[in-house]
Image (spheres, helix red, strand yellow):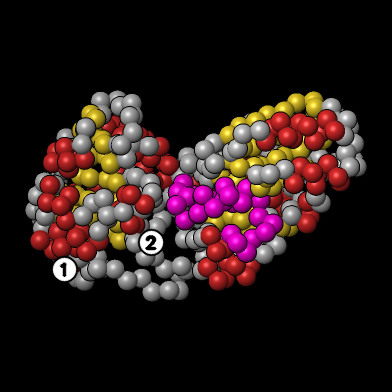
């Protein structure tokens, strides 16, 4: 059997939901894939109905890819999260089914950081209330509750890609930067590392959250943490909705403990622009509520629409997993002569030997072979130099522990 590709590309179905930038669809259509774009998010039942024949799924932050969804996706090879977070995807079940997941960890970093800086300035000047008063015909010219951000202490919780870049820009505009992260992170510029969350909360005039969506971060900021903050603190959350107890935040805004707040993410968010938004934070003073748009700039969406499809196509066409968030990471060049076989299996002893025995049994010479494992799966790419029969593929699939076997070309 000789093949240039494992499967006709026009039969590889791609589903992109939640209004992903059309550049992504254009790239994948140019590659030969069949692409469907949906402007809104899908609930579990709607996604199950759409995903049956889909090989590549593209989502943003709202669409939940649950185990039940994955059970109805027998052809799914890869998922692209056109955003930073992947907590909306059951990554463990994806591993169990041999589905690689990719995201865009850097593409919208600048957009989120710019919004954070802008909100700090607006809230320190009490501008949300002043702007609203003007629209109501009230002229409130006063310097009361209005301050510069220069020389104020900014506490960054989460010093990853966004937190670190925020640190640099914040220092450039005159803020004194403190940060806290559960992992060891190198301080940039003159930023000061806090050894505990409490230490950061007690020193900061402005607090900005930039943590991921892991379950243990749920309600990491609640009544106890607000009590540890300075009176009159500015509080910003552009990370994940569930990391803040919004009822506790509401009470602390009403009491004046929090003098200003900007929230872009919520524990429950509408799945589309027609659904009503409800929150205990609505109508509170000096409070900015935005509809999860921290990374929603045209520049960021164009970058994401280029980056994620490229990672997905490299996986489909070459087997590359160098940027996957759940697979063992392998980077391979295009194979010019021969065929490339991919074997995904449970991380058990002896599987690689069984693969090689199968190929040797059929007198197949191995041109190159790559194996990477993580705690759950092994990922083997084998390049061979001769024709192969369908029996080889079936025998590879029959190896105990096999999850998925795929032929690229």
Give the residue at x 30% y 37%. Answer: 182
- In reply to whether residue 20 is colored magenta, the answer given is no
Q: Which residue is mark 2?
A: 291
Q: Quadrant of the N terminus?
A: top right
**Foreground: disc 2 or disc 1:** 2
- Does residue 93 appear left or right of residue 213 in this picture? right
Give the residue at x 59% y 59%. Answer: 70
Q: Position of residue 380 (x, y in %)?
A: 68, 35
Q: Position of residue 154 (x, y in %)?
A: 22, 39
Q: Quadrant of the C terminus?
A: top right
Between the residue at mark 2 and the residue at mark 1, the CA separation in whole angstroms equals: 27 Å
- Does residue 110 appear left or right of residue 79 in this picture? left
Q: Which residue is mark 1?
A: 138
Quarter where residue 334 is shown: top right
Q: Position of residue 180 (x, y in %)?
A: 26, 36
Q: Residues within 10 Å of mark 2 (few under 14, many from 20)?
A: some
Q: Secondary structure at mark 1?
A: loop
The residue segment tinted magenta is 70-99
Q: Main secondary structure of the magenta part?
A: loop
Q: Is residue 354 above or below residue 227?
A: above
**Which is nearer the N-term, disc 2 or disc 1?**
1
Residue 18 visible at all: no
Residue 348 visible at all: yes
- Does residue 405 appear left or right of residue 305 in this picture? right
Q: Residues within 10 Å of mark 1 (few under 14, many from 20)?
A: few
Q: Nearer the viewer, residue 63 or 369?
A: 369
Q: Secondary structure at mark 2?
A: loop
- Does residue 290 appear left or right of residue 143 in this picture? right
């Amino acid at each position: 059997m000789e093949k240039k590709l494992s499967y006709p590309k026009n039969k590889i179905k791609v589903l992109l939901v939640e209004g992903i930038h059309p550049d992504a669809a254009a790239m994948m259509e140019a590659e030969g894939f069949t692409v469907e774009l949906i402007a809104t998010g899908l609930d579990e039942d709607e996604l199950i109905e759409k995903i049956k024949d889909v090989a590549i799924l593209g989502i943003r932050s709202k669409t939940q890819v649950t185990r039940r969804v994955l059970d109805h996706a027998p052809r799914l090879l890869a998922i692209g999260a056109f955003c930073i977070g992947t907590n909306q995807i059951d990554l463990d079940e994806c591993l169990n089914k041999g589905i690689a997941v990719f995201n865009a960890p850097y593409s919208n970093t600048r957009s989120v950081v710019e919004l954070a800086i802008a909100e700090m300035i607006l809230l320190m000047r009490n501008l949300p209330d002043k702007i609203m008063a003007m629209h109501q015909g009230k002229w409130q010219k006063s310097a009361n509750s209005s301050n510069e951000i220069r020389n104020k202490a900014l506490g960054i919780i989460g010093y990853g890609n966004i937190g670190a870049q925020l640190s640099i820009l914040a220092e450039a505009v005159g803020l004194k930067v403190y940060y806290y992260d559960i992992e060891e992170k190198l301080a940039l510029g003159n930023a000061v590392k806090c050894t505990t969350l409490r230490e950061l909360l007690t020193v900061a005039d402005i607090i900005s959250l930039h943590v991921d969506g892991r379950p243990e971060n749920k309600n990491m900021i609640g009544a106890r943490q607000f009590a540890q903050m300075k009176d009159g603190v500015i509080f910003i959350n552009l990370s994940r909705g569930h990391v803040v107890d919004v009822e506790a935040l509401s009470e602390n805004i009403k009491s004046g403990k929090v003098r200003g707040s900007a929230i872009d993410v919520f524990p429950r968010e509408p799945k589309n622009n027609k659904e009503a938004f409800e929150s205990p934070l609505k109508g509170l003073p000096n409070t900015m509520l935005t509809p999860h748009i921290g990374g929603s700039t045209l520049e960021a969406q164009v970058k994401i629409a280029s980056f994620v499809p490229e990672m997905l196509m490299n996986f489909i066409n070459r087997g590359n997993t160098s940027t996957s968030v759940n697979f063992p990471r392998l980077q391979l060049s295009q194979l010019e002569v021969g065929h490339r076989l991919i074997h995904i299996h449970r991380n058990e002893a002896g599987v690689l030997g069984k693969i090689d025995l199968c190929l040797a049994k059929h007198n197949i010479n191995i041109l190159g072979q790559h194996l990477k494992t993580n705690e759950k799966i092994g990922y083997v790419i084998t390049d061979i130099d001769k024709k192969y029969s369908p029996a080889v593929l079936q025998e590879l699939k029959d190896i105990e522990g096999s999850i998925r076997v795929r032929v690229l070309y």
